Amino acid sequence: MRSFKRHKRLTLMSKKAPKSPKPIDMARKPRGLPDKREGLIHAEQAMIERVTAVYRCWGFEGLDTGAVEFADALGKFLPDDDRPNAGVFALQDDDEQWLSLRYDLTAPLARFAAENWQTLPKPFRRYAAGPVWRNEKPGPGRFREFLQCDADTVGAGGAHVDAEMIAMAAEAMRAAGAGDGEFTVRVNTRRLLNAVLEGIGATGETARLTILRALDKLDKFGPSGVADLLGAGRMDASGDFTKGAGLSIDGVKRVLAFAEAGRATRGETLEALGTVVGTGEEASAGLAELDAITRALEAFGAPETDIVFDPSIVRGLDYYTGPVFEAVLLKQTVDDQGGVVQIGSVGGGGRYDDLVARFTGEKVPATGFSVGISRLAAAFAMAGTIGALNGPVVVLNMDRDDPSEALRLATELRNAGIRAEAYMGSSGMRPQMKYADRRGAPAVVMAGSDELAKGVVTIKDLKVGAAKAAAISSNQEYREARPGQFEAPRADLVARVRAIVEAEDE
């Protein structure tokens, strides 16, 4: 008897409905990997379209190399440790080979050019746009997943090629939405820095990279902070210590004198540089390079206000071999807490003659520039220049049992090229109006039994209605006035709604 009862109990337990999965403690997302709503998505896509239109106008062709590459093909050019997955997001495939999400669009281009060099037009001029990933510490306007929009010329040397890229970079910044005085493209050459480093005896690879990374933080830490990084090291506010390059006091002064040699015009900066870089072969070659870029920029008609020579620009990636350039957003923005944020660099590039040679063994000259679309869009959003988009016209469902009329009205609007949707929920009138407001709808359309009997529709212009409602003091007056709401003949639906949508767009 005892065993029978146990068997019966187990049988009954087995027929119970399965338990719901236990919810996790918190819905959360890793930092630096942003979720995006429609307004930001649209702004970024529009920015990419405008920038790539500039690249195409200058004769570049599109290319997409995909998001994943072999880690050794990407190379180790980020300022991080010697692990395959440091600085990048990497995993091993079933052959135990390391794969990485691309950290930029340039390293995959070098691999593509090496694989297809025999069949490509030379020089090969391509543009590309898409997401890239870096496993780095995020910050304001600095993400671990972000969009870039690049242009590169592979197979052509000479300062005029770099100057073309620099002049096009300024045009791309304007196309992206930066106005007069809101940006500058800063230019330098690694050859001059090499000359300074040779002059102070800093020829080792480790010392050179440490100095490059220290100078790359001049805007962030200022001269005193960079002086610490060039010397013994720097401790930040949290107590973390970063070991420095170990330069002598005189060596620190010479490097900083070079970095701060920028002047008001390109010509004046060249003169100042001539007094601090020495007279060696590398120094002479670097000065000649900037002089040739100056002449080419004049031929392109590039304004002095758009493009300046700035010796502090070194660029963080280690594959650059000659001229380097950086697009900087000058206007300040404000974050969610009201703090002033200087976004700074929003694009950059330079010459990288050794990158393709990693695959072929033969040096192939190359230069390129990248606009940081996500970083620019974040800056514009903080500055309030990216507003919310108008949502769709919402056709309210006035008959829960048979929504056919709402479906027909929405279809008619869409067939006329108007963005529209029929409400698909099961709520009443007030929640439907609240839904339309949260969607940013320019208008709602209603067609209940009374409207159908009269052959009309009721349309409410939500923006006009909100403006008029602000001047109404009582609920009774609001119900009687129904601000922004009117009836229109059924045949006039499209024309009346289109007028509201077009007025909102303007």
Image (cartoon, helix red, strand yellow):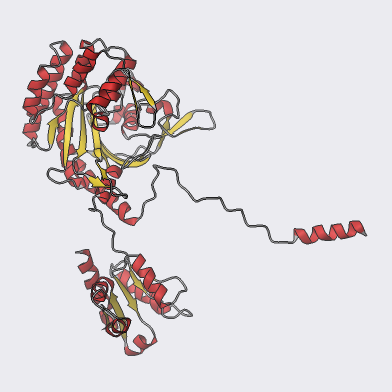
- Total number of numbered labels? 0
**Is the residue 404 above or below the residue 26 in the image?**
below
For the residue pair 476 and 119, the one nearer the viewer reads as 476
Residue at screen point 20% across, 21% down: 256
The image quadrant that residue 148 belongs to is top left
The image quadrant that residue 487 belongs to is bottom left
- The residue sitting at the bottom extreme is 453
For the residue pair 445 and 381, the one nearer the viewer reads as 381
Q: In this rendering, would 376 be left or right of 446?
A: left
Question: Quadrant of the image for the N terminus?
Answer: bottom right
Question: Quadrant of the image for the C terminus?
Answer: bottom left
Residue at screen point 36% across, 81% down: 447
Residue at screen point 38% across, 24% down: 241
Q: Mark yes or no: residue 215 visible.
A: no
- The residue sitting at the right extreme is 1
Q: Mark yes or no: residue 343 visible.
A: yes
Q: In this rendering, would 65 be left or right of 150?
A: right
Q: In this rendering, would 42 be left or right of 68?
A: left
Give percent across and percent down for residue 67: 39, 38
Give percent across and percent down for residue 143: 35, 40
Give percent across and percent down for residue 434: 38, 70
The image quadrant that residue 118 belongs to is top left
For the residue pair 280 and 246, the one nearer the viewer reads as 246
**Is the residue 308 above or below the residue 173 in the image?**
above
For the residue pair 291 and 438, the one nearer the viewer reads as 438
Give percent across and percent down for residue 249: 24, 14
